[in-house]
Amino acid sequence: MNNRRFSLMLVPDEGRVRSLRISTAALVACSVTLLCFLSVGVWGGWQLYHADQKEREISALQNQIQMAQSRYAEQAGELQSRIDADHRQMAVYARDVGTIQARLARLDALGSKLVDKASLDSAEFNFGLQPAFGGPRLAASDVDLNGLDVSLDRLDSRLADLDVQLAAVDYLMEQKREEHAARPHAWPSEHGWLSSNYGFRADPFTGERARHNGVDIANRFGAPVLAASRGIVTFAGPMKDFGHMIEVDHGYGYVTRYGHMSSMTVHVGDEVADGQVIGRVGSSGRSTGPHLHYEVHRYGHHLNPAQFLPRG
C-alpha cells in the first residue's frame, strides 16, 4: 500500500502540466508582442532621426541658396557700378572728342589765316586736307577699348600734324616781322600791382615749396586784361588750375599766357593789337582771390615775366 502511494505521487498532475504549457505560450506571446513594440519603437525613432536629418539638409540648402542670392546681388551691384562708370567714362570720351574736334576746326581756320597773311604756298600748307597716315590692320580682338579711343588717337595725331605745320608757318612768318614788335613789353592789365614773383615760393594752398612759372598781378575784379604785344590768339578757354586762360603767339617764339580771368573777349584765331583788351581779371581756377597770372614763354621755355614788364 505504501508502494502504491509512492507511485501515485510520482505521476505528474495533468492539470498542472496543461497550466504550465499555457503559461509558457502566454510568455512567448508576451515576448513576441514586446519585441514588436520594441521594433516599432526603433523604427519610429529611426524615421524621426531620418526626418530630422532631412530637415537639417533642407535648412543648409536654403542657407546656401540665400548666400548665393546675396553674392549674386552683390556681384550684380558691382557689375552695375562698373557699367555706370563705363557710361560716365564714355560720356567723358565723347565730350573730349567734341572738344578736340572743335580745337581742330579752330586750328584749321588759324592755319588758313596764317597761310594767307604770310603769302605761303597753299598746296604745301593745305589745312583743309586730311594728313596721310597708315599702319597695320588690327583685328577686332586686338582693340583694347572701343572706337572712341581710336578716334582720340587719330585726333591727337591730327593735332600733332597741325602743330608741325603751324610751327613751320610761324618760322616763315618770323622772317617778315620785326622782333621788337613781337617782344612782350606792355603791362598786362589796367593798373594792379605785383603780388607774387616768378620762381620758387610757398604754395598758397599747401604752404609747401613750389615753382611759380609766372607772376601774379593783383587787381580789382573785372579790371581789363591787356595783350602785352600784338599777336594771334592760339588758345582761349578753360584750363586746369588756370581757370579761364588766353594764350597769344607774338612770333619769334614769344608766347604770353593770361590766367584766372573772369571772362574773355577774344577767340582762337583772332589777331590782337598791342594793349588790346582780351578779357577781365577774375579768380577762376586755382586761385585765392582776383588777380592775373601772367607768363612769358619763348620757344617753349619759361622766362621771368619781370624782365618784360615796364619800369615804374
Image (spheres, grey):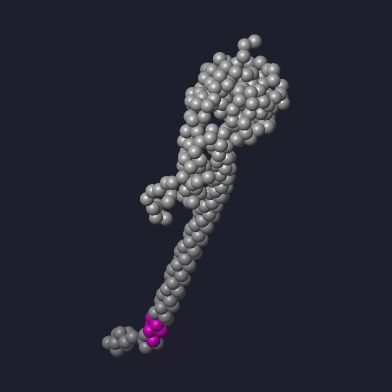
Q: Position of residue 208 (x, y in %)?
A: 54, 20
In the image, is residue 70 above or below residue 106?
A: below
Q: Is residue 68 visible?
A: yes
Left/right of residue 28 with respect to residue 78 in the rendered view: left
Q: How many marks?
A: 0
Task: Based on the picture, tell me whether residue 122 belongs to the magenta stretch.
Answer: no
Residue that extends furthest to the left in the rendered view of this protein: 3
Up-down: is 68 above or below 263?
below
- Range of residues picked out in magenta: 18-25
Vertical arrangement, residue 19 with respect to residue 229, above or below = below
Secondary structure mostly seen in magenta is helix
Q: Is residue 214 visible?
A: no
Q: Nearer the viewer, residue 154 or 43?
A: 154
Query: Which picture quadrant has residue 197?
Result: top right
Residue at image location 52% in from the left, 20% down from the top:
303
Left or right: 169, with 218 as reference point: left
The residue at 62%/19% (across/down) is: 186
66 up-or-down from 34: above or below: above
Q: Which residue is painted at 39% across and 55% down in the image? A: 139
Magenta-colored stretch includes residue 24 = yes
Measuring 56% from the left and 19% from the top, which residue is drawn there?
180
Q: 30 or 231: nearer the eye?
A: 231
Residue 170: % across, % down = 51, 31
Q: Position of residue 243 (x, y in %)?
A: 62, 31
Q: Split into 4 quadrants, where in the image is the C terminus?
A: top right
Question: In the image, residue 103 lies at what x, y percent?
Answer: 57, 40
Camera-side residue of 305 and 206: 305
Residue in the foreground of this view, choosing between 44 and 36? 44
Asked where in the image residue 223 lies, by quadrant, the reply is top right
